[in-house]
Image (cartoon, coloured by chain):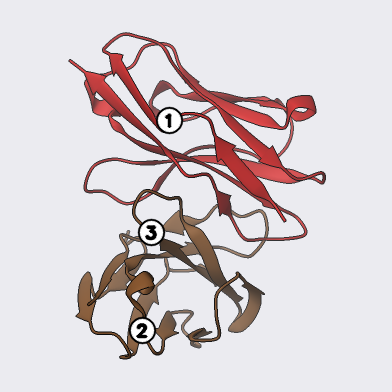
Amino acid sequence: DAGVTQSPTHLIKTRGQHVTLRCSPISGHKSVSWYQQVLGQGPQFIFQYYEKEERGRGNFPDRFSARQFPNYSSELNVNALLLGDSALYLCASSLGQGTNEQFFGPGTRLTVL
Amino acid sequence: AQSVSQHNHHVILSEAASLELGCNYSYGGTVNLFWYVQYPGQHLQLLLKYFSGDPLVKGIKGFEAEFIKSKFSFNLRKPSVQWSDTAEYFCAVNSYRDYKLSFGAGTTVTVRA
């Protein structure tokens, strides 16, 4: 039974570029959340999508955007990359929103030079 | 807004020692509480969760946690640690009003053989 998958595993970009990260949830899960984990800190919530609609947004600038597709997979887009965007980006899926347990993927390690 | 604080940044133990990691949260409403673990080179995995009912929750690998509502705490315990418990441990909280998971900064646990 496949867990949450994310691609790519690693990514190196330069300042000012944009990046797209992808996430496939566990089969049957309809909610996807994105988190940013900077080295030495806990994950910080970026977005939650449920049934293809944004249901929650964290304290991140408008350079960050996301969407969820009809098959419940999701993309996270970051424009005008800054050095401070270097982090591990985690995707989590759950059956629904709210109290459901979230299952995390392995993450995408983004390095901005 | 919710916040989560973990009291210990790094804990070093010998095998068979007992472990207790502190977690406090700030939120006045109904919350769901979680402990996640990240073993070296692996992704975040759920250790245990509390939604309602018995405040003493048992999780995988011999871990347990106690929810003390009056103290806004959800401390993690294990009576006798093993070398394989070396990992980073994160406490997380969400609420019925705000579905995002708020994480603590994490505690690195090193168990010496």
| Disc 3 from disc 1: Cα separation | 27 Å
Residue at mark 1: B60
- At a point 55% along the width and 86% down the height, the residue shown is A62
- Chain A color in figure: brown
A100 vs A107: above or below:
above
Residue at mark 3: A38
Q: Quadrant of residue A112?
A: bottom left
Circles 3 and 2: CB atoms closer than 8 Å = no
Disc 2: CA contacts within 10 A as few (<14), some (14-19) or many (>=20): many
Q: Secondary structure at mark 1?
A: helix
Amino acid bearing label 2: Leu
Residue B3 locus on image (x, y percent): 65, 48
- At a point 72% along the width and 42% down the height, the residue shown is B26
A31 vs A61: above or below:
above
- Asked whether, in this view, residue B82 is left or right of residue B7, the answer is left
Amino acid bearing label 3: Val
B37 vs B3: above or below:
above
Q: Chain of mark 1?
A: B
Q: Secondary structure at mark 2?
A: loop
Quadrant location, the N terminus of chain B = bottom right
Residue at mark 2: A81
Residue B92 locus on image (x, y percent): 56, 45
Which chain: red?
A: B
Disc 3: CA contacts within 10 A as few (<14), some (14-19) or many (>=20): some
Q: Secondary structure at mark 3?
A: loop
Looking at the image, is mark 1 or mark 2 nearer the viewer?
2
Q: Chain of mark 3?
A: A
